[in-house]
Image: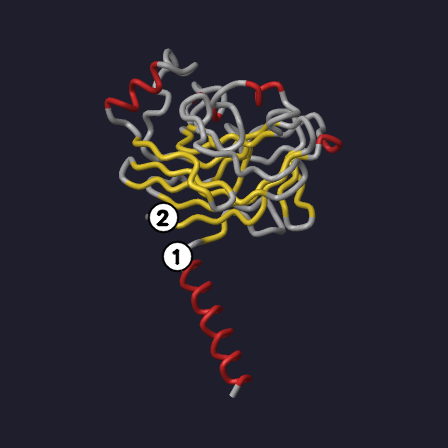
Amino acid sequence: MKKIFLSAMIVLAVTQISKAQKGFKPLFDGKTTTGWHTYNKTTVGSAWQVQDGALHLDLATKGKDGGGDLVTDKEYGDFHLKYEWKVAPKANSGLIFYVHEEPKYHATYSTGLEMQVIDNDGHPDGKITKHRAGDLYDLVKSSSEPVKAVGEWNKAEIISKKGNLTLILNGAEVVKTTLWDDNWKKIVAGSKFATWENWGTFKTGKIALQDHGDEVWYKNISIKEL
């Protein structure tokens, strides 16, 4: 009877996990850079290496073609994104979304919003309010800091639906705000992006992994369109 009960519990757990993952599609297959390219290019910079199932910005392999920010081939509107990240000591990066890819915009952050990825204590940016891990970069400060120690994997989620934005770090909801309304315009007006043309206005865009010149890893990247 005990064995039957345990088997039933295992089946239930597997079913629950399957339901939770329903509708999510991988953006990274864990083996190749298929589905990605360097911003405003058609190829992927040599610094982005696939190692042990993760996308690793490996500075040792940064040749003439460099690294550059990686962006998805596809654009997304309303979505639920899941991913894991870790950084080397003193490193800075970011997951940037609603990126409008066009040569007139020189970088992914010229148009896109960023969930900060950083060594809070080791990188100078970590001393700036709204520039710490999990923050909506330069816009909204995290309500808590559940970030793991440097070198450990963090689990992050970004949910954007009908202008309602939620950022989750290691299971904790750290940012909740509304995009594109009057309050959003006030938030942008009080940020470094205040005078940037069309910044934060695009309602569809690409997902980007930032090359900030520091070593970073990303894995288990998946998305559900809402």
- Which mark identifies residue 23? 1
Marks 1,2: beta carbons within 8 A: yes
Residue 18 position within the rendered picture, expressed as x and y whole percent measured from the top left: 45, 64
The image quadrant of residue 74 is top left
Q: What's the residue at 53%, 38% (across, down)?
A: 146
Corner quadrant of residue 200? top left
Q: Residues within 10 Å of mark 1 (few under 14, many from 20)?
A: few
> Percent from the top left, x then y, of residue 42?
54, 34
| Closer to us: 86 or 109 | 86
Give the amino acid type for the residue marked by disc 2 in the picture: Glu
Q: Earlier in the sequence, mark 1 or mark 2?
A: 1
> Is residue 164 shown left or right of residue 65?
left
Read off the residue under disc 2: 225
Residue lying at 60% horizontally and 25% vertically, measured from the top left: 212
- Residue 172: assigned label: none
At mark 1, the secondary structure is loop
The kind of residue tagged 1 is Gly
Image quarter of residue 143: top left
As drawn, 151 above or below 91: below
Q: Residue at x 43, y 54 (%)?
A: 24
Query: What distance separates the C-alpha of mark 1 from that of mark 2?
Result: 8 Å
Residue 57 in percent (x, y) is at 65, 35
Q: Which secondary structure lies at badge 2?
A: strand
